[in-house]
Amino acid sequence: MSISLFLFVLSVLLVFLGWRLNLSRFRLPSYLRGPPPESWLLGNQGQVVKFEAGVANRKWREQYGYVYRFHGCFGIEYLMLNDANAIQHVLRGQTTSWGLDDSLRQFLRLVTGEGIVYADGADHARQRRLLSPAFNPVFIKSLAPTFASCASRLVKEWNRRLDAEGIDGNWDVNAYHWLELLTMESIGATLFGLRFGALEGEEHELMKAYSGLMADTFSQPTTVGILLQNIILHIPPWIIHHAENLPLSAMRQLRAAKTTCHQFAHDLIAQKRKEIKADPTKKDRDLLTILVKAGEKNEKEAIEPMSDELIYNQLTTLFFAGYETATNTVSFALCELAQRPAIQERLYAEVSSVLGTAADDELAEGFDANNLDNMPYLEAVMNETLRMHPAANHTMRAATIDNSIPLSKPIDAEDGQHVHWIPVHAGQRVILNFDGFNRSEIVWGTDANVFRPERWLENVMSKVAPEDQCGGPYVNLANFGGGPKACIAWRFAIIEMEIFIAMIIRQFEVRISNPDYEMWRECAFINTIPMQKGRLDRGSQVPLRIQRRMAK
Ligand code: HEM
């Protein structure tokens, strides 16, 4: 037996023992209701994966209330939070009374290394201060022409394919694949100052390593897969290093992606340092240059700078956090528009009147981010897509001290009492259900489950009561988390995605190509990915029929 395997088996035994001892300590109040577990081994997790993302939660929420007891594997109890005040309490308390749940933390370490999403407490605050200059709103707005230029390259390629492969002016394509390429190009250009050439057919090692990573690794897990994920994700940190070397294909894929990104970052940082030395006055055009400069400046100011290892981890983190989230969100947006011609036509009318008929590359070169302020319907479509399809379906946290969670609306306890606060012990795990909040009928009304961008033009925000606000940084949506660990790049993401959608819809009419298609929202670990119902074996799918709107 290899040392890795031995340590793995040992750690599993230790973890089991720890759980058995700890279970009584972490027990939730007995009056809380929730779905009965299928078994001690699987808890409710096996039931969740049988459905689309969010469906099981919505069913249980109706039955047991917006906060309920949820059983994970091996008898671990979670508190499932769909309630606005409860979510806000945990998000705001991050780094003081709430920290990363162990399983999420180990997952993040596996995928990104010990960068900002992995860090907690004072270490997190320091990293956030060092990264913040790269996400200031003025700099993010200055990236608009870069986003638009990437989108114009996608439009050019689609036009080319339409001519070469289209039939009667229609071209059928799995747009998901192209949106992956687009987001990757955009991250390459804005984070690293590089052109990968992926849209033009060049193969880049990063692209190969990350393409479809979450879908391949975590979608449709078998019972054994669910158990393995849980065992691996609960291994103590001092042993996880060995777990990374386990001969499991998911581990191999995650490890390879991280190594590729690290090597790539290593070479790139060396190159950036050379460029900065050669011309220290050159205008900052990418986030990496800002980061490298910020590190050096801090050295002089005696703030502990980021080590090279930490900068590699940050780049891997930014790449991972920014690539699939935006791909999935824009994919869902196109999928919704393709199924709703009236909404698409209204959007087209607005986009074409504001952006005009200039050639794409010309438009991109001078793209002014303020254009987006003149497209309220684009913003409404963006917001409604985010609301209905949060790229992170949920996230997990654990209490670091005993505390009480306040609720916006009381829930009914087992004995019929109305509960307004739920006391939890240090160590208690909670699931912040972003999808559950975003589709809450209490917050958004009885049509919360309907894709209706118009609600944003009716100023839905003014109708939301203060106690129904989740504390997120953007329009009361939970998509970007909140509090001290809210998505650092939410402005980046909104501008990027709105520009992508506008540039595509300005040029193409999109419809669903496959008459049998029904959208399936697959939850892969915590990510929501668009697939085709009944054909999950095909992986991520957005089957579009593309038609040109204007003459080239
Ligand atoms: C639709 C797009 C995006 C969504 C929905 C999204 C969502 C999130 C969420 C929910 C978190 C908090 C995760 C947690 O604490 O459990 C987060 C954190 C983060 N995101 Fe995003 N994100 C998006 C795009 C991006 C992009 C484009 C980047 C980078 C270019 C990025 C970089 C980060 C970073 C660095 C953090 C960690 C912040 C911290 O811990 O202080 N995200 N994001």
Image: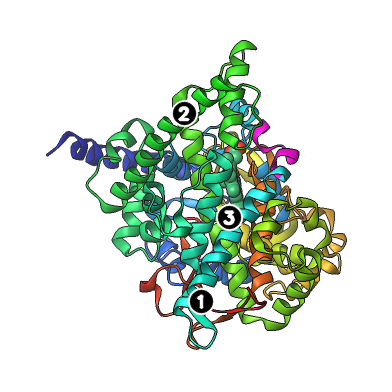
Left or right of residue 95: residue 518: left
Count of numbered labels shown in the rendering: 3
Q: Residue at x 46, y 59 (%)?
A: 200
Q: Residue at x 75, y 55 (%)?
A: 476
Q: Nearer the viewer, residue 119 or 515?
A: 515
**Residue topped by disc 3:** 150
**Residue topped by disc 1:** 162
Image quadrant in which the C terminus is located:
bottom right
Q: Is mark 1 within 8 Å of ligand 1?
A: no
- Amino acid type at circle 1 is Leu
Q: Nearer the viewer, residue 307 or 69?
A: 307
Kindly tell me whether residue 89 is visible in this rendering: yes
- Could you tell which of marks 2 and 3 lies nearer the N-terminus? 3
Residue 81 locus on image (x, y percent): 62, 55
Q: Is residue 370 above or below residue 463?
A: above
Residue at mark 1 to residue at mark 3: CA–CA distance: 19 Å
Q: Residue at x 37, y 45 (%)?
A: 257
- Could you tell which of marks 1 and 2 lies nearer the N-terminus? 1
In contact (CB < 8 Å): disc 2 and disc 3: no
Residue 35 locus on image (x, y percent): 51, 66
> Could you say which quadrant of the image residue 45 lies in?
bottom left
The verdict on residue 539 being magenta is no
Q: Residue at x 51, y 34 (%)?
A: 314
> Could you say which quadrant of the image residue 379 lies in?
bottom right
Task: Decide: few, some or many residues near mark 3? Use Cα within 10 Å; few <14, some 14-19, many ≥20.
Answer: many
- Amino acid type at circle 2 is Gln
**Residue topped by disc 2:** 271
Q: Which residues are magenta?
A: 132-140
